[in-house]
Image (cartoon, coloured by chain):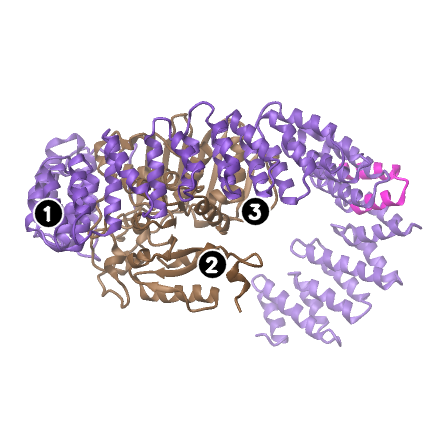
Amino acid sequence: MVPGGVLGLNGATPPSERINFGVIGVGNRARAILPNFLSFQELRVITVSDCRADRLKSAKQMVDNQYQNQACETHSDFRKLLARKDVDAVLIATGNRWHGLASIYAAKAGKDIYCEKPISLTIAEGRMLVDTCRRHGVVYQAGTQRRSTASYQFARDMVRQGKIGKLKTVEMQVWAGPGIPHDTVKPVPEGWDYETWLGQSPWKPFVPARVNAWQYFWDTAEGVLTDMGCHYTDQMQWTLGTDSTGPTEYTATAEFPDPAKFCSDTPVTAEARCRYGNGVEGVMYQRGAFKDRYLRYIGEEGWIQVDDETDLVTAEPKSILKFKAAGGAGWGDASDHVRDLLKAIRSRGTTSVNAETAHRAITICQAWNIGLRIGRALKWNPEIERFDVETANRMLYREPRAPWRA
Amino acid sequence: MCLGAFAASFCLADSPSPFEVANVFARASKIEPGASVETWRQIEDWLRASTRDDAFRRNLLEQLAKLAGPHSTFEARRFSCTQIAIHGGAEALPVLSGLLESQETAGMACLALTTYPQGKADALLRDALPKAKGRALVQIVQTLGDRRDPKAIAMLREIAQGSDPEAVNAAVAALGKIGNAKALSVLEKLIKATPPLPTGVVEDAMLTAAAALVKAGNQADAKRIYSRYTQPGYSHRLRQAAFSALLHLDRDGGEKRIMEALNGSDRILRPAAIQGVRQVKTKGASERFSVTILKLSDEEKVWMIGRLEQIGDAGAVHTMQDLLKAEQEIVRIAAAAALGRCGNPGTVPQLTAALIQTTTTEEIKALESALITLRGAEVTQRITVEFQRSQGAARARLLNVLAMRQGPAAVDLYLREANSTDSALARAAYRALARTAGPGQISEILQQLTGDLNREVRSEAESACSKILAQIDSEKVKSNALQGALARATIPEAQASLIRLLPLAGDERSLASVERAMGDSNDQVKSAAREALADWPNLRAWGLLMTTYTSSSDPALSNEALTGMVRLAAESNTQAPPGMTARYQALMAKAKSNADMKLMLGALGGLAKPEALDLALSLLDRQGVQAEAKAAVKRISESIRKTHPAAAAKALAMVGSQ
């Protein structure tokens, strides 16, 4: 007897038409987003990879539980996963230092990609990612899923329809980052491939505080301003229709952790501004609590805001809200974003947040960070992707530690 | 916390003395994990601030170079290299040269060197190659590739012919990045090497070289590479990518190549050809592509619609309008969605015609959505014309479209159509009014509610009135509007509708109307009044509810009244008015059964007052409700524990909770 699903009966997708996924990096973020993938009949997660044995084991269990079998295969080296012919696409949910490089490796292996944000560690790495995806003809979707979220779509539509008059400012808020206390060297835990964990970042001994809070170190990430900020700069770019370009001027101020107490080196609070050629200003505040994040478009005749924690949309004049349809999933449900990727994989078309789009959005946050590092206001030429200050241009790229290369 | 800033330029009032600088660097050189990094932050601040003091900066850079030397800790050397990458110059080259020799430090040296201008840094890297081994060799090869050093080609060729797979792969990739004619020639020879190089590495290098050749203006060699990879035998994605790259190099934007692919039998290249359609800018191209559309599969037609939408010219719009009549629904839906984004006022008749004909929910949704989003000054006017011409179900659909397009601006139209004898249309009109009408329209809509409406229309009309009344703050205004309508209402259905709305006013006058209606001879009116009383939003109804509860012989009515009172009491608990406990007491005194008493105790438990606690305590011994009384005592005690600790503790002790 052959089950109907195998033949594509009863609405099931036959195995020959399923898109086989591998997952690279199966930590907290992967566990949060994987259910969005596993719920689709037309894809199958067939293998997972991680440089930590404990995570590999629990991810396999999660996938196997979903499919009610023991078929999910594991790889401690993601290159082995990429070498498999039966993997069509990958979900990349590693730490930030790996997002860009793992995507580049996947593109070179001909795999379509869904990658968590921020999509690169440097602006030049982002550009290499865009070029590599194009060169190898792979479909790429960045995990800035708010483009597929009803509340944000509504806010964008209202701005684009002129409901708040001429757009003047896009105000964004992310939460204040922590300071990570100093810590000493410890043995690498059993089951960890620490060399791979470090990836392209300069070698350093295993210090638990640095490893566990990698988001707040320049070598391995760039702090909250980029980590969360890129969601909002992506929205700003989308609403302004500037997906293949970006702002031209950047300024920022920030408060850094006290180096006597803390080893982390990314801002605790910040106020960062950018300006587009048409005069629209973007302002990113890094302050307050996690729940206080928001995106607000301010026009000459009103404003519209999405509260990220609650997905609540508010506006002035309030009459704007009458145009809002009821319902729609919040950003926590990435299903529509995954669906958009699957559609593009089938048509070999483009996704809502393709590599170029995502690269331009993260460039804004990276430019702020570069300005903060060198203590300068910056002018940016989005055509050639260069700053007006040579020191800043020297921060466009970081040579990866061998054997990893872009 | 310390402040770092840009916008304000960094400037030190007085540069620190060389002694102070040396002292800070000396301390910085000893840092190990776990120690304070104040000296590092100090050095970073100085580097930022030193741009206007040449001597100070020179000293800093020399100290920084020294910090990368063998007398510093590994941590300090890594810190130094990250700073050299940003600020360093010739002074750091000797120390970086030393770092290149070791497998442990070559990575940090290359991190620094990669940002240096062409010239000495490249020479340094090339000089280090012959002696480099293992990871250091791979690192240097990669950096030479990233720096696109053409003088390294010969050395890279040798390494690419070696036996260390990591180094071979790195060298091939580096040759691809250098990507000039000489590098390409080397790569083409390497492709034929035995044993063969890894396919993926070679393909990537060749395609990287092709991109570099295009940038350098050498299109002929680039085309040769891309053409090779479009041939069968390579992976689908690679073939498609190479095909797309060729389209960018074609003088006609790829039109000829796309047409060949669309008309050909190679199904792998067809998606790439369809994707390429959007970049063809030649006049009339969309019409020419449209001719091929009938040869495509349904799925390919949908993709083609997406691309034609991006062109969005008259030919593209015309084709999509034709596809509104396509056999397959997915094609029709895709055409509708695309037209909504790129159509024009002239598209309205086609979309409305399709909307009239279709019967499927998905297609109705797509067509309505297209008409809602369609742009152009005359679009709304044309939809209005189509609406006036239309009949039957289409009329309601078009009204819905107009409501979504215009919002409050078309309220007069909705009011007019709400009177329609066509039930679907009238319901659509009331739905539009519910979303768009304001307090200014309430009298008129209430007036319509007094008319003879069918049940479904009445339900929508009531819902619209309810939403508009909720926008009005003043009880008096709401009450006057409802009383005026009630005075005019002659049929029981209309009276019942209006009575159900009276709780939205919530004033004494409205309550009196409800009380009167409870004695009405018509069952519909009476039932509406009972419903309104049970839903009354404030304590004004307490007396009437109490009377109804105690005096009614109808168990259902009695129960409705009790439920209303318990709900009101519970809602009032958090901001209880004076005498709330007395209300509970009076209610409990009239309790008709233990079941009723249990309901009352449930609400009483939410009243955080010492008097409420006394009342609950007094019921602890009452047969049949002891558990509920005990629960109420516990709950009240917990909530007044801070303000009345002694009473709470005593009560909790009595119920055995302390």
> Which amino acid lies under the numbered mark 1 shown in the image of this protein?
Glu
Query: Which of the 4 quarters of the picture holds residue B490?
Result: top right
Amino acid tagged 3: Gly
Circles 1 and 3 on the same chain: no
Q: CA distance from mark 2 to mark 3?
A: 30 Å
Quarter of the image holding residue A326? top right
Image point (60%, 75%), residue name: B653
Nearer the camera: disc 2 or disc 3: 2
The 10 Å Cα crowd at callout 1, few under 14, some 14 to 19, many 20 or more, is few
Percent of width and height locating residue A379: 30, 29
- Vertical order, A310 against B618 (above or below): above
Q: For chain A, give the colour.
A: brown
Magenta-drawn segment: B477-501
Looking at this view, is B177 or A193 the one in front? B177
In front of the other: B582 or B227: B227
Gap in angstroms between the C-alphas marked 1 and 2: 46 Å
Secondary structure at badge 1 equals: helix
Is B461 magenta? The answer is: no
Name the mark on residue B484: none
Q: Which residue is identified by label 2?
A: A15
Q: Amino acid at mark 2?
A: Pro
Instruction: Tell me which chain the residue with mark 1 is part of.
Output: B
